Amino acid sequence: MSTVTVPAAKPSHRDDAKQIFDAFKGLGCDSGAIVEILAHRDAEQRSLIEQEYESAYGEELRKRLSSELGGHLKKAVLLWMHEPGERESFLLKETLKDERAVTEIICSRTPSQIRKLKRAYHTNVGNNLEDDVEEVLSGDHKKLMVALLTTSRYEGPEYDEVEVEKDAKALHYALEDSSLTAKTFIQVFSERSRAHLCAVSDAYKTMYEKTLEKEIKDETHKHFEYGLKTILRCAENTPRFYAKALRKAMKGLGTDDPALIRIVVTRAEVDMKYIKEEYLKKYGKTLKNAIHSDTSGHYRGFLLALVGEK
């Protein structure tokens, strides 16, 4: 559910375009005015503003924003201006060598979302996503990503308890034979539905008195480990996964601003309401307060607006 608040009375995209143009005038840019407009418009409204701006002023709005804004605010606003499908393909192309970011994006998506992502990537980038992943990534991590991108999976809530128990046993056996571990986990985690994986996780804990996530942590490593854990965590509770990812981005000294921007911008119109609830439940602190503590200026204001707190 979106946390982006738009005016009750539908704003005029012509007026919005003019106000943005006026914000560029003079020395410096009125970043506050830019944030106030763009952070409170939905995808359709943002698209209309772009079209009107180019028609009225003879230049691309994104190019002007890129020249007028700076730092993290610029990155956040430009990412926000992309149409959702285009945005995801742009993100993947930009972060293809950032293995954690690519893993987060691909492993957190449902099969239908992955199909849309592949089509958008081909349209906007001109390549097949699986080919680019194959070229850039390596090892078991690459095999897992390619399997997710090329395998059809059921998305419904039903599952077969006999098959669930069979998979739990297969995973346990594979963990005892290192030659089978990666192959078996890739097969189960790329071919089974989210409902089935949740049932496998529950069955595994009952049968072997150890969580499947703990087994993954103990027996796999680095990006392959993160991919498997991401698939499992999103099968169990996607908003909770993103709440934990946001916490990691803002925990300790320094802020992982690329991760913070990526998550807030891509989830604001999807499930941010539930992410905020999970964040408060898990950490006893509002996401608003966390973002406020780790950011500043118009960048802070923009992110807070997207999460519905400004």
Image (cartoon, grey):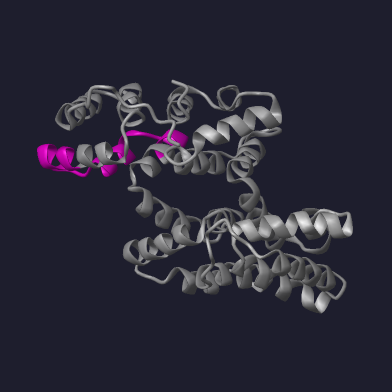
Quadrant housing residue 81:
top left
Q: Is residue 198 left or right of residue 12?
A: right
Residue 87 x/y as whole percent: 39, 50
Placement of 38 over or under 82, stated as above or below: above
Residue 250 in view (yes/no):
yes
Compare residues 272 and 142 and report the one nearer the observer. 272
Which residue is found at the position 81% from the left and 53% from the top? 211
Q: In the image shown, does 207 or 10 lie closer to the viewer?
A: 207
Question: Which residues lie in the magenta part?
Answer: 51-74
Relative to 9, 218 lies left or right: right
Q: Quick check: 164 above or below 250?
A: below
Left or right of 123, for residue 182: right
Residue that appears at 81% across and 73% down: 174
Residue 191 magenta-highlighted? no
Quadrant where the C terminus sits is top left
The structure residue drawn at horizontal position 43% and vertical position 53%, both measured from the top left corner, is 88
The residue drawn where x is 48% and y is 41% is 267
Return the x and y of residue 192 as percentages of the image width and height: 62, 66
